[in-house]
Image (cartoon, rainbow, N blue to C red):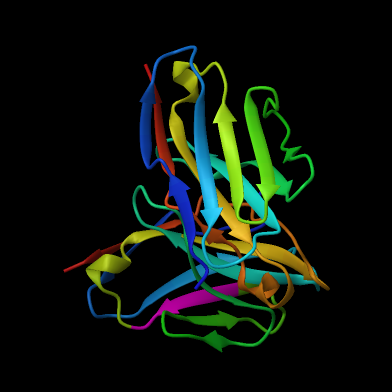
């Protein structure tokens, strides 16, 4: 079972920031938080990941609470092409090994003009 | 970098026939590959995990004799749906991950294969 909970859907106006929350209250010390998105009928696309520090890349920012029990993905200036299902996933990494990805139901983000 | 090619993108087959789906990592060596299935309006469900040169590990409820997985090289994994039935119609997606420095960057997904069994 997925170890995260997300709202099923969200709307965002084009050009505004989209803030997508995720709860992972049972996360353990060696689990990272990953975000992927899936545009209709395509494979998921990696967005960003983090352990405990906030992260930023060209696509998004990831804010992780100090207790690591929740996080927020921020798309700073949403466009219509950001309309997709966004998945928050916790994944184990230890040494050179990696855990698999278990997808929950995700959040369907609709960016509106 | 980190491109995964999945082929075919869609296929229609007759009930009772077998269909093979290929997943290739184009610019890295994939030590681990995963196969997912996705029904309409549902999330991705992990079917199996394969490591190069060893047998695949199937998730509970997935028939290993029906969904044959081969990961004979570090760049190619195949999923064969044997004796396909209409209820096998779904969107099949592979993902691949490398070792070493690539471990932290998650997995790269193929574009998916839409299988329709008639």
Given the current orientation, which residue lies at the most extreme left position? A113
Return the x and y of residue B72 as percentages of the image width and height: 69, 45
Return the x and y of residue B16 as percentages of the image width and height: 49, 12
Residue A75 inside the magenta-drawn segment: yes
Residue drawn at point x = 28 percent, y = 80 percent: A16
Looking at the image, residue B99 sits to the left or right of residue A84; the answer is right
Q: Is residue B55 above or below residue B100?
A: above
Residue drawn at point x = 52 percent, y = 68 percent: B2
Return the x and y of residue B117 as percentages of the image width and height: 41, 20
Residue B40 inside the magenta-drawn segment: no
Residue drawn at point x = 27 percent, y = 67 percent: A81
Q: Is residue A59 above or below residue B111?
A: below
Looking at the image, residue B19 sits to the left or right of residue A100; the answer is left
The image quadrant that residue B82 belongs to is top right
A49, B7: nearer the viewer: B7
Given the current orientation, which residue lies at the most extreme top position? B16
Q: Is residue B63 above or below residue B4?
A: above
Q: Quadrant of the C terminus of chain A?
A: bottom left
Looking at the image, residue B70 sits to the left or right of residue A46; the answer is right
How many tags in the picture?
Answer: 0
Residue A10 visible, this angle: yes
Magenta span main SS: strand
Residue A69 visible, this angle: no
Given the current orientation, which residue lies at the most extreme front position? B73
Residue drawn at point x = 46 percent, y = 48 percent: B6
Q: Is residue B29 above or below residue B12?
A: below
Q: Which residues are magenta?
A: A71-76
């Amino acid at each position: 079972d997925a170890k995260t909970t997300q709202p099923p859907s969200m709307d965002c106006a084009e050009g505004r920031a989209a803030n997508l929350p995720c709860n992972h209250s049972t996360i353990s010390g060696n689990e990272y938080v990953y975000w992927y998105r899936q545009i209709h009928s395509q494979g998921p696309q990696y967005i960003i990941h983090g352990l405990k520090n906030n992260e930023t890349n060209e696509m998004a920012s990831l804010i992780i609470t100090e207790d690591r029990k929740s996080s927020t993905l921020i798309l700073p200036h949403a466009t219509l092409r950001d309309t997709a299902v966004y998945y928050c996933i916790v994944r184990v990494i230890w040494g050179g090994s990696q855990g698999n990805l278990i997808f929950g139901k995700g959040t369907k983000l609709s960016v509106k003009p | 970098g980190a491109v995964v090619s999945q082929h075919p993108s869609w296929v229609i087959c007759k009930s009772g026939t077998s269909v093979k789906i290929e997943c290739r990592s184009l610019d890295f060596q994939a030590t681990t590959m995963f196969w997912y299935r996705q029904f309409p309006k549902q999330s991705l469900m992990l079917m199996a995990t394969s490591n190069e040169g060893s047998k695949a590990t199937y998730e509970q409820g997935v028939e290993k004799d029906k969904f044959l997985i081969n990961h004979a090289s570090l760049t190619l994994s195949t999923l064969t749906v044997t004796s396909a039935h209409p209820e096998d119609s779904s969107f099949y997606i592979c993902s691949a991950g490398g070792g070493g420095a690539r471990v932290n960057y998650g997995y790269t997904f193929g574009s998916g294969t839409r299988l329709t069994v008639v």
